[in-house]
Structure formats: C-alpha cells, structure tokens
C-alpha cells in the first residue's frame, strides 16, 4: 500500500509544518513572516524600472492578483479564491482549500482581463471585475506566456496510474509533463509531451542516468 502510506506521511508532515492551515484556522503554507520580506528603502524609486508592477500572491486569506504603482499603492486587484472558480474540481483527486493552492504565472491584457494558473489546479481567465470568463480543467503550473498570435503557452501534467508502452522503464505511477498551446478563448490547440520529445530525440538515457 505504498501510495496510501505515502499520502498519510505527506498529510502528517503538512500537519506538523502548517498546523493552523491543516486545521483550517488561517493560511500558513504560502506566507512568509514579515521580517523576511525584502523591504525597498524610501527614496530609491529612481533606481527602479518605471511603471506598475503586476504580481500574484495572497490578499489576507485568499490568493489573488494585483497591480501596484511605484509607491506600492494598489492600482487594481483581482480576487480569485479557488473554490469560487471551481466549486467542484473534478479534474483533481480532491478539492483543495482556498489556502492550499497557490497562483503560478499570470498574463495581464490591456482591457484588464487576466489569465493565470493555479498550481497544478487549472488555467483561468477572468475580467477586470474578477468574473470568470473561462476555465481549463488541466493540471497547469508555473509560467503562462502569451505569444504574438495571442496564444498562450502553459506547462501541464497528467498522471499515469499504470506503466506505458510508449515510455519503457518508467515505473507507474508517474506524471507526464506537457506544454500546452491554448487559444485566447481557452481551447487547447496543441499538447506537446516532454517525455515524447525526449524519447523521439534518443535522449531517454538521461532519464535513468542516476538510477
């Protein structure tokens, strides 16, 4: 029962490291204590790149996206707790709490729309009022890039519960990583497998070089 024991161990470790979050009292996992946050000294604006800064993070108890000016004032914010976007996340093994999933990668459009990725939880596009325009139920993560054609490029992954003849010597279960090309309206145009590219390039040996 390896997977069950591994899941139990992970839950125990999470409880020990983030007890208040595990008990759903307050978020801890993705927050840094204030003294550890880099502070920008007053009067150094001339040394910074001019313009607004676009970033993801937490608004109190929920993840979100915001735009700040050179003085650190909030110009606009998008509030996007996971369970308001996906009340039933059937593409995931279990429904995460709003505190238990981070935002990874985001793109801001001129009209105020934002496309962002939940960490292994899906890709979402919202308007300037944080209303969901579309959502893509894939295990997307990390970067979101918009190309000159308006298409989005996003890494994703899929779980293989059993061994695959396409990828010999990789024991199950394993994740197959992909790069997705996605249209501006949320349709998958291409799905490029990283493992497939490695095997077709005859570099599969690097996957097993360390045993």
Image: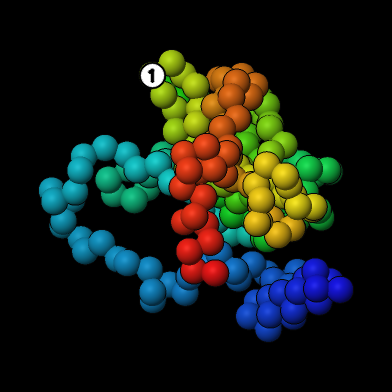
- Residue positioned 68% across, 31% down in the render: 135
Residue 30 versus residue 194: which sits nearer the camera?
194
Q: Quarter of the image holding residue 115?
A: top right
- Residue positioned 47% across, 39% down in the render: 201
Residue 89 placed where, x, y %? 80, 44
* Mark count: 1
Residue 153 versus residue 56: which sits nearer the camera?
153
**Is 69 left, or right, of 138 in this rendering?**
left
For label 1, the residue is 148
Residue 112 placed where, x, y %? 49, 26
Residue 26 placed where, x, y %? 67, 69
Q: Is residue 66 above or below residue 100?
A: above
Q: Is residue 155 above or below residue 163?
A: above
- Residue positioned 66% across, 56% down in the render: 170
Q: Is residue 70 above or below residue 58?
A: above
Q: Which residue is outermost to the bottom? A: 16
Q: Which residue is outermost to the left? A: 46
Residue 84 appears in the figure:
no
- Residue positioned 21% across, 64% down in the render: 41
The quadrant of the picture occupied by the C terminus is: bottom right
Residue 148 placed where, x, y %? 38, 19
Residue 27 appears in the figure:
yes
């Amino acid at each position: 029962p390896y997977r069950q024991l591994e899941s139990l161990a992970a839950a125990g470790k999470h409880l020990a490291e983030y007890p208040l979050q595990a008990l759903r009292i307050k978020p801890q996992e993705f927050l840094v204590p204030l003294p550890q946050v880099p502070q920008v000294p007053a009067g150094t604006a001339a040394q910074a790149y001019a313009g607004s800064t676009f970033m993801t993070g937490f608004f109190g108890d929920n993840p979100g996206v915001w735009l700040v000016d050179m003085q650190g004032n909030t110009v606009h914010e998008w509030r996007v707790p996971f369970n308001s976007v996906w009340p039933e996340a059937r593409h995931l093994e279990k429904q995460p709490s709003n505190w238990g999933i981070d935002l990874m990668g985001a793109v801001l459009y001129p009209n105020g729309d934002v496309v962002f990725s939940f960490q292994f939880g899906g890709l979402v596009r919202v308007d300037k009022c944080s209303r969901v325009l579309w959502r893509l139920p894939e295990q997307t993560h990390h970067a979101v890039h918009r190309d000159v054609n308006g298409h989005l490029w996003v890494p994703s992954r899929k779980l293989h519960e059993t061994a695959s003849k396409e990828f010999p010597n990789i024991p199950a279960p394993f994740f197959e990583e992909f790069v997705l090309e996605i249209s501006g309206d949320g349709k998958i145009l291409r799905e490029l497998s990283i493992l497939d590219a490695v095997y077709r390039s005859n570099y599969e040996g690097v996957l097993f070089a360390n045993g």
